[in-house]
Image (spheres, coloured by chain):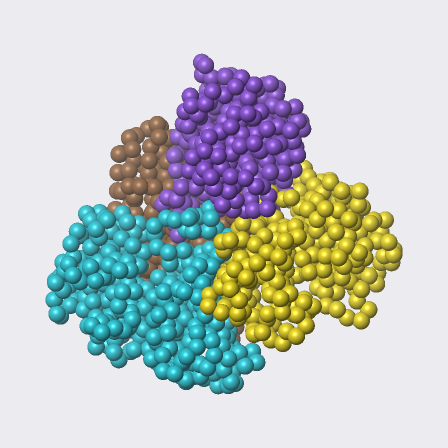
Chain colours: A purple, B cyan, C yellow, D brown
């Protein structure tokens, strides 16, 4: 059994992580730390956990674990590492964006299994990708792998309200968000850094822009991403690149028909669809922002880091409606 | 032209009031006070007002008006009256629940036009009914008028999130409220006071309970109320009581078929439906909680207080979908 | 391994059944029959099943199975039994309402595990309860078990659109149902038969009405039920009855705080809450209408009928948002 | 008073048209034809019209009117013109897409007031623009008017379910559409014809593509459109072009801050916002698809054709939530 510790246990991603790990056959949840909710039972904060797991949030993380998931929010991971002396043999999976970009002294492996499978298997420290970054990379990387990105890539992606975290705000107020649509951080979303990094990892000469419009959708969970660019190859050929790229992938499926977003909710899957319109290739991809876009992918990475089947604990029933 | 002042201009009910008054042919909006947003243009706070009305929120209310609408929130009206020396000739329409219940020294008329039409016409100070209270009274008062309430009245009413105001909270967070249902203040909602008061105004011997379960619905606007009790009369007869009771009503319609809530959204209407099942009479009623349940009814009352047609400024296009 | 056959495989309940059985460790899905979709891959109809299970719908059911789930819709089960010669040793779990009521020649056991646990364990033919019937019985049966139902029971329950099946209609049209509420089949819903039957099974002298208003909610999944009646016992005492009644239940939890509906979505749980207001006891209960209200409960019954742990295959991750 | 006839009175656009015309001070509704609902009262089909207008649908159109609105659906207008001998002096406003594209023998004026104001004033036959076409043109035409479109224009626009009409289908089923997102008719939507026609009317040398991804949103009403292209001018300059272009427009407002869609619901407004990101200009525009995108714009055109103030009958209260 893998002994797991969780830091920042009260947020949305920690909640989803606990919901998954509660049924993971190889995992024992040793300690869930939360500053804001120390002492409370898990199901007082994540109320649907009633009957699924017992225990209370701890003030301090117990380091006698095999792996630590850090769910504390962006900018807090270094603080954690400074506070705790994490033993050498304890692996770390960081769900924040603090260590996703390569840098001197950054020994975190970027944890997109479809890109860095072997590196992840031997990783000690892992930076789990962002939600938008996951959906968009899984749509674009097969083209980068073929080196065919020679123009701007146009991306539009709609995200659910859980992507904004659980602090109430004007744009997460039900009276405002219900039946509403809006754009934010046009062309400047923070996930562009990791997306560009991965594209260049596969196509070093990529010299154009990924033009990304993030959209606030009026639903709690899910990401629907569409992107297009110019590629001079037949639809059949491009589809075959995607099928090749994902032939070993545990959770990515290349569909014959365009997906709708609800097909993946509550699962770790990503569905990808490719179609050509003249010289334009259009790719759509859908994920659950909190699962494949966060906690499910973190568990997938844990499975890889500990030599388990990638799907262990992740054969999740879709919520479907 | 009626010169209007508004106190507490930044909240939901004030927003709806301004949207209605902006097109009222007999009204001139003289002053809109807001402590929290003094100095800002109206359409910076109520963003959809762009192009409909110009002006900025005032720090202090200008008392050179014919009528003041108080939209400050419950408990603040007395404070307002203590602060401002409102001239004798200025009428007051209070949207809070501060003066709805009869009391010594309370000279506010309870402003349900279907109940107190004549008193409203000559009122100087008016207490505008609550939203649940409006929907429920319009469903039950025709029975009280006949004196046939001899058992408990069972009420279930679902309200939109705007009923909870614009301060974000756990239960108005989109991620929580979307596709969710819950109950609050079971059998103890504060509107029971005014409902019972009106029932007894018409049927003095009413000695049973109005058992009311308020429900949080996953929609922003509207109230759907259903109530039933025992009445030994034929359906035809009971329906005729309702048609009689509302034969002069400007905004209440007794339908042949059960309504759905969206039929009244963005209007000042109340739709009522009556059916018998054995000895049980079932009444459903639907309103827009912010219009007939608040600001629209306030304008209807203003029309009555100033001798105008009740419908002036209130022939509103339904939002319908 | 239990070899499973499914009849009527294209509907909502069959879809949920397949989603659950796909990950059930003791089940092998042998044959899924569908007249309307024979020959098509499962994931062409239940599109989210991509990657979870392979296979195509069969024109005819293969009877070489251990258990048959009948998901054909109400009124079709007798037709199935007339058409197929189901061998003696093959168990049948019927999700329709055809055999829920006791009758001469009806050898189907009513499959509410919290009521008929032992009978279910030895059942050959089982009638799976209705969705509303499940939510309401789990709220009221502990009172019947104590014999304290001496007045009418007042029930209001809101259901999701999947309760109406997948055929499009006026009341399942998105443009109509979004943000809308309405009532149907007031005091006459077909599930009242099975509810009254179970209440009388526990309290034979029950001679009052269960007055039930079914409500169409603007969400796809879930049931939120509230009921109240008069009970002269302290809150503490009544709560203890509920805890006793459910102390061995695998999926029912008696909560200290009132639940919201989303706490149970995508799980087989039922959450129940009890509070007293004067002499009135108010009980709320929430389920997922397609899981505990249909396919999950059917699997729970299968587990019991085959001597498995009730939770086998039903430790489902909540969809939570 | 303008005597109005309506053809195809039972659909969504006819319903919105009636809701608007019911309160139009210069209009008398003479005849509303509907084949499917002849003989029924208006408020039996458009149920929210109760109390707003009386009358029943006619089998045949009475031609003794000043103007006919054709709401029959695409492809039916020629059929209407072949069946009825419309007198010379009766104006026609066609809401279908049958006559929007210039052609020999097509004497219908394209009815986008912000583009063809003077021509509309003297039009006898008018083709009312499509909903997407309206939102997108109002976002792009000020650039075309400056002749600065020298690259592809990238458009993403999300529409409500009412855009798909009232016939129930898989993609308008509530259980499917709630909380869902999907794309359709990628790069090939039928409105591209009229959009390109208008762009070339202002910038004859436009030789690039308008790449348009239409998105099905999970809300009933509204369109949120975003588009971007390369323009080498400062943000200040581009914004000034938009302000100039719309300085006489009755319903288009150029905002300082990016709009959200709900700001315009139930109104005839279009809100436009412009921002620069490097050489990229991003324009967002929002409309109500059934009002500015259909029936409201039709009334605006009627006002122009009859010499009235454009806003007559169109000072509509926003539904706001």
Query: Depth check: B79 or A215 in front?
Result: B79
Left or right: D160 as drawn, with respect to A122: left
Left or right: D219 as drawn, with respect to A319: left
Residue A205: tell me if it is visible. Answer: yes
Question: Tag count in the figure?
Answer: 0
Q: Residue furthest top?
A: A104
From the top left corner, tell me how far across and down residue A35 is, in percent: 43, 35
In the image, residue D85 above or below residue A87: below
From the top left corner, tell me how far across and down residue B209 is, in percent: 44, 74
In the image, residue C288 above or below residue A43: below
Question: Which residue corresponds to the image point at 41% horizontal and 65% vertical from the top-left?
Answer: B188
Question: Which residue corresponds to the image point at 28% horizontal and 38% vertical from the top-left?
Answer: D239
Residue B299: tell me if it is visible. Answer: no
In the image, residue D177 above or below residue B96: above
Q: Quadrant of residue A304?
A: top right
Question: Which residue corresponds to the image point at 54% horizontal and 30% vertical from the top-left?
Answer: A5
In the image, residue A224 above or below residue B204: above
From the top left corner, tell me how far across and down residue B247 is, in percent: 38, 81
Q: Quadrant of residue C272?
A: bottom right
Query: Depth check: D228 or D28 in front?
Result: D228
Query: Depth check: B210 or B54 in front?
Result: B210
From the top left corner, tell me how far across and down residue D200 is, in percent: 40, 40
Question: Which residue corresponds to the image point at 42% horizontal and 48% vertical from the top-left?
Answer: B170
> Which image quarter is the N terminus of chain C in?
top right
Q: Quadrant of residue B291?
A: bottom left
Query: Depth check: D70 or A247 in front?
Result: A247
């Amino acid at each position: 059994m893998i002994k797991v510790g969780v830091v920042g246990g009260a947020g949305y991603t920690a909640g989803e992580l606990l919901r998954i790990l509660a049924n993971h056959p190889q995992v024992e949840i040793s300690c869930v730390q939360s500053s804001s909710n120390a002492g409370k039972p898990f199901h007082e904060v994540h109320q649907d956990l009633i009957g699924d797991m017992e225990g209370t949030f701890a003030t301090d993380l117990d380091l006698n674990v095999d792996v630590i998931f850090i769910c504390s929010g962006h900018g807090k991971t270094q603080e954690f590492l400074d506070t705790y002396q994490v033993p050498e043999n304890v692996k770390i999976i960081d769900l924040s964006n603090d260590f996703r970009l390569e840098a001197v002294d950054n020994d975190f492996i970027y944890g997109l299994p479809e890109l860095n499978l072997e590196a992840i298997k031997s990783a000690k420290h892992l930076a789990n990708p962002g939600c938008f970054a996951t959906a968009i990379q899984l749509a674009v990387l097969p083209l980068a792998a073929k080196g065919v990105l020679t123009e701007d890539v146009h991306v539009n992606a709609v995200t659910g309200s859980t992507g904004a975290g659980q602090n109430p705000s004007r744009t997460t107020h039900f009276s405002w968000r219900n039946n509403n649509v809006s754009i934010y951080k046009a062309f400047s979303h923070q996930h562009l850094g990791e997306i560009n990094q991965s594209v260049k990892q596969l196509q070093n000469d990529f010299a154009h822009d990924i033009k990304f419009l993030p959209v606030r959708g009026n639903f709690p969970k899910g990401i629907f991403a569409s992107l297009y660019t110019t590629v001079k190859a037949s639809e059949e050929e491009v589809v075959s690149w995607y099928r090749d790229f994902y032939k070993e992938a545990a959770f990515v499926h290349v569909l014959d028909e365009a997906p709708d977003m609800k097909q993946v909710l509550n699962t770790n899957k990503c569905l990808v669809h490719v179609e050509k319109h003249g010289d334009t290739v259009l790719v759509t991809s859908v994920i659950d922002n909190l699962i494949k876009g966060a906690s499910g992918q973190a568990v997938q990475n844990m499975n890889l880091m500990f030599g388990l089947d990638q799907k262990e604990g992740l054969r999740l029933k879709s919520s479907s409606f």
